[in-house]
Image (spheres, coloured by chain):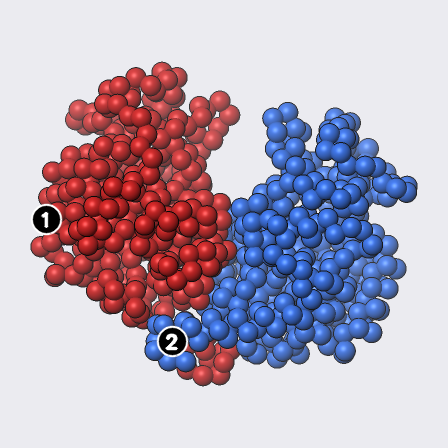
Chain colours: A blue, B red
């Protein structure tokens, strides 16, 4: 399934894998795809630097990418302390009451300051650190990065990707200088719009024409779906959720609560909600998301306040052991994530399935192989 | 793109076209697909009989199907008058006030009784009339029909199809004796669930195995999307919305308000709402659907009361001439419906696009033709 996009990135297959784990990202790159490390969880740039140094040593010289979260227009921001003062006490009370009701224990050590990668200044430091490692791609999960960031990436010879949930957003990204558009459909995990991949992907492909290639994201976790994405006009695929149940996916030494929750979930067990970051994102539906959907629950706060509000709660749930109470972005493809396997095996199976799907479709409809 | 499913139905291409217009249905069958006439709008079985007799004369001997709306379990129902008494006066007031505010004129003649095809007794009469015309398919838009209806269709040698928005529903349909499952994704027009086609289609295909073929429905209006559906494991496609902007689509002698509204709409201009029938259905987003989404608007009533409530309002809007105020089920594929063309031309273009998509994908990824 090699194609010109894969050749351009120096990878074997046009399969891009987004993941917050450097272990998963490195394994994806080693398996012939492009592992893209999500940076948002690195509050300290030195930690990101260490992770990328580790990846430099553990990717057998294969390319990898990084993903930041950076709005094109710079929001007002202050220090974490200033921002925390903007969170209404009623919201804090609701979070505490809910965690108590759901039986989530407090953190064992001292509380941290939430995930700060949603802050513009922190994301910018991620770009600085990343560029020094000469990644094969800088992707931005919130549309095009600011113009100067695109310029600096290009000066360093690094192409820039941006996610789009609508064709007009994709066009805006291309006009801003983005080199690769990720068309992310409604069914995707994390930040996602209303338009499903079946409609969105060809619409984005038609909108951007031959100016930039398009990756399909959302709902993909089988060779049939990869072939469908190519049929829709995508030059490759972007998988995020699907790596969450790989053997290599383990953030820290916590329990495997999240993977247990994911493995048993069906495609109908997700919800699109503003609970996680303040913007609509698809999450696993759990007692935590349900609590926010009850009458009387507060409205989620705007980004970046919502994540500051719930960051500690999320860590508490992550370290607890109840799969009914987790906070986890994941797409509808979770219904297909039914076992924990190594990345190399996942990738090999995807590639074999693409070939199977191709010959099945050809035989059934065109009588050939 | 002939395949074994097409052979089984005696059609040239596995493209099933649902439409409330006998003119469109006949044209789809003449063009080599299977036109499926939606019966819900025929309050009087004699009118359906006349429409099917017309189709018998105007399909060049090609097969066609019919689509009824029949829940598997028989709901309590009464006469239209009994049912009307169950509609709260506040709901009627809201409809009248809204129509006044939106400038929708009253009907020129006497008011009718709403669309009764949602009633079980009426749907059953549709089945009786349809079977006498020996259709190639009876489809049910609400899951499997009641067991005796499946039995009678089978006795008459007529296969039965049912729509499913979840894999477990599809399995239930197969166990009820259904011969063909239509996997209808989130992006589809009309009644639709939460799971998008990219995820739903392979999930349904895996669930039903080789017991029955699966059609993909939702979001399809190009050859790329048809090829994607086949890649996902479907044996064919079911298109509904896409025929609404054909030249043959005209219910009665009304103005072309609805087509004008559809042609200019984008993929983001739909909404999933209970306004139309009482069950979640995707509609064009207009000032009418927005009025129901305002704070203070009443909750839609359960089926069949909601349609009795709004039936006359829908006819009033249909006969008016404001494309901002229409009530029309349509899928996200509306963004691709940008001109009014004859069915034969639509079908020819779809087929040519499938071949284009196939050779493009093969060349780009496998170096062949």
Q: Position of residue A56 (x, y in %)?
A: 81, 72
The residue shown at (32%, 65%) is B350
- Residue drawn at x 82%, y 55% is A252
Tell me which residue sits at (42%, 38%) in the image: B280
Observer able to see residue B204: yes
Q: Nearer the viewer, residue B361 or A129?
A: B361
- The chain holding disc 2 is A
Badges 1 and 2, same chain: no
Q: Residues within 10 Å of mark 1 (few under 14, many from 20)?
A: few
Indicate the position of residue A151 as horizontal and vertical percent values. 72, 66
Q: As drawn, is A98 to the left or to the right of B200?
A: right
Relative side of B270 to A276, left or right: left
Q: State the residue in front, B207 or A150.
A: B207
Q: Residue furthest bottom?
A: B368
Where is the C terminus of chain B found, in terms of image quarters?
bottom left
Q: What percent of the width, then of the height, locates residue A324? A: 67, 41
Q: Left or right: where does residue B214 sit relative to residue A107? A: left
Chain letter behind tag 1: B
- Horizontally, is A63 left or right of B227 in the view? right
Badge 2 marks a residue whose secondary structure is: helix
* A117 lies above or below A62: above
Q: Which one is closest to the eye, mark 1 or mark 2? A: 2
Label annotation for residue B53:
1
Reading the image, the residue beneath label 2 is A363
- Is residue B349 visible in the rendered image? The answer is no
């Amino acid at each position: 399934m090699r194609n010109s996009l894969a050749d351009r990135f120096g990878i074997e297959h046009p399969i891009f894998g987004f993941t917050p784990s450097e272990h998963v990202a490195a394994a994806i790159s080693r398996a012939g795809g492009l592992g893209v490390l999500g940076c948002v969880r690195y509050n300290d740039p030195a930690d990101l630097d260490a992770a990328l140094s580790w990846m430099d040593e553990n990717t057998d010289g294969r390319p990898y990418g990084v993903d930041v979260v950076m709005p094109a227009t710079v929001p007002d921001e202050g220090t974490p302390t200033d921002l925390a003062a903007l969170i209404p006490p009623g919201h804090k009370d609701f979070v505490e009451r809910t965690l108590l009701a759901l039986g989530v224990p407090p953190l064992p050590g001292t509380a941290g300051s939430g995930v700060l990668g949603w802050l513009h200044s922190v994301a910018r430091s991620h770009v600085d650190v990343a560029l020094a490692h000469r990644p094969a791609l800088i992707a931005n999960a919130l549309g095009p990065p600011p113009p100067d960031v695109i310029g600096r990436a290009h000066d360093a010879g690094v192409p820039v990707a941006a996610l789009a949930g609508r064709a007009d957003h994709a066009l805006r990204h291309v006009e801003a200088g983005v080199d690769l558009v990720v068309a992310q459909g409604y069914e995707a995990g994390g930040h996602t719009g209303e338009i499903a991949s079946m409609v969105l992907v060809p619409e984005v492909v038609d909108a951007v024409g031959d100016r930039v290639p398009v990756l399909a994201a959302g709902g993909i976790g089988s060779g049939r779906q990869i072939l469908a994405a190519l049929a829709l006009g995508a030059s490759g695929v972007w998988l995020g959720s699907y790596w969450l149940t790989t053997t290599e996916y383990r953030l820290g030494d916590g329990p495997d609560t999240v993977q247990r929750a994911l493995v048993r979930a069906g495609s109908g067990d997700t919800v699109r909600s503003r609970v996680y970051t303040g913007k609509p994102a698809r999450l696993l539906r759990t007692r935590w998301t349900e609590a926010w959907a009850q009458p009387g629950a507060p409205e989620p706060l705007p980004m970046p306040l919502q994540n500051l509000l719930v960051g500690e709660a999320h860590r508490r749930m992550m370290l607890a052991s109840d799969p009914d109470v987790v906070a986890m972005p994941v797409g509808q493809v979770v219904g297909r994530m039914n076992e924990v396997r190594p990345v190399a095996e996942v990738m090999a199976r995807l590639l074999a399935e693409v070939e199977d799907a191709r010959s099945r479709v050809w035989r059934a409809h065109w009588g050939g192989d």
